[in-house]
Image (spheres, helix red, strand yellow):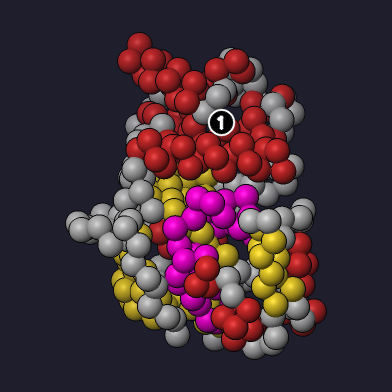
Amino acid sequence: MTTAPTRDPITATSGTPVLSLRSATLSFGDRELWRNLNLEVRAGEFLAVLGPNGTGKTSLLKTILGQQKLTSGSIELLGGPVSRGSRQIGYIPQQKLLEPGTPLRARDLVTFGVNGHRWGLPISSAAVRRHVDEILEAVGATEYANVPVSTLSGGEQQRIRVGQSIAGSPRLLLCDEPLLSLDLHHQRQVSELIDEQRRASNAAVVFVTHDVNPILGMVDRVLYLAGGRFRIGTPDEVLRSEVLSYMYDTPIEVIRSRGRIIVIGAPEGYGMHDHLEHHVAGGTR
């Protein structure tokens, strides 16, 4: 079902993988999203998860978060079972603006990332406040730390969500289309911010996206899901005309131009024509 990826210096390192899936299959009724997925993600690795809607990208994240059980196979986090609310995982959701009038400040959301797992109301000690200040500075949000999040721009809100996700020093950072609805400027800022935090903490990143171009220079490997099939490998190994033509069972052309990837030729029947010609090319939703 998949080709063996070339092992680069990151994926070839010794020690327990941060994330490991073995013979993993996920189905909903008679509909099988993927079968016999074998995947290891190592510390410091940046894995991009690509593919059309409905192929199980977000379901994969839910499985890692302990919110969705595999149909068969196994999944491990740092050598043990996955569980809901693990402090070893940071999560950046899809961009969703908060309702106007929401009183939560930027620092409140980041503080919740530090001690929100505890019972009762979070108590901010001097040490916690210093830690929150350090995170706000790291994500470039110090100037609006005490501003209600609902008044911030989409890019600013995503910065706060990145800060919240790294507040507990996770070993694995899950990103569910965090660039969605952001303009190109903020896409670049947020993706670079995530990459900086990965390098600073040596955390592994699993990054679901429709558009690989904003993160192309950061990606170590790609997991591409389509048509019940998958491929794992470097961007050069997976994002090729012959590979995607096989996965979509139709002729697909992959063009590389000025450091960007453009994929052309998906049939309308797949419902992903816009995805292939615009999302992978770097357009808007």
Please give the residue where the numbered disc 1 appears in the rendered image.
160
In the displayed structure image, the side of residue 124 where residue 91 appears, left or right: right
Q: Outermost residue toward the top? A: 126
Q: Quadrant of the C terminus?
A: bottom right
Q: Amino acid at mark 1?
A: Ile
Q: Residue at x 52, y 44 (%)?
A: 92
Quadrant for the N terminus in the image: bottom left
Q: Secondary structure at mark 1?
A: helix
Residue at 63 percent across and 41 percent down: it is 188
Q: Position of residue 6 (x, y in %)?
A: 37, 71
Q: Nearer the viewer, residue 258 or 33?
A: 258
**Place of residue 36 in the rendered image (x, y in percent of width and height, measured from the top left):** 39, 81
For the question of whether residue 109 can be seen, the reply is no
- Residue projecting furthest to the left: 15
Seen from the viewer's position, the closer of residues 61 and 259 is 259
Identify the residue shown where x is 36% and y is 49%.
Answer: 44
| Segment tinted magenta in the rendering | 206-235
Q: Is residue 212 on the magenta stretch?
A: yes
Q: Quadrant of residue 186?
A: top right
Image location of residue 87, percent across then percent down: 34, 42
Nearer the observer, 159 or 189: 189
Magenta stretch contains residue 218: yes
Using the rendered image of the protein, determine whether residue 11 is visible from the camera's viewpoint.
yes
- Residue drawn 38% across the image and 29% down it: 115
Give coordinates of residue 195: x percent, y percent. 48, 42
Label 1: how many Cα within 10 Å (few below 14, some 14–19, many 20+): many
Determine which quarter of the picture holds residue 64.
Answer: bottom left
State whether residue 89 is above or below residue 71. above
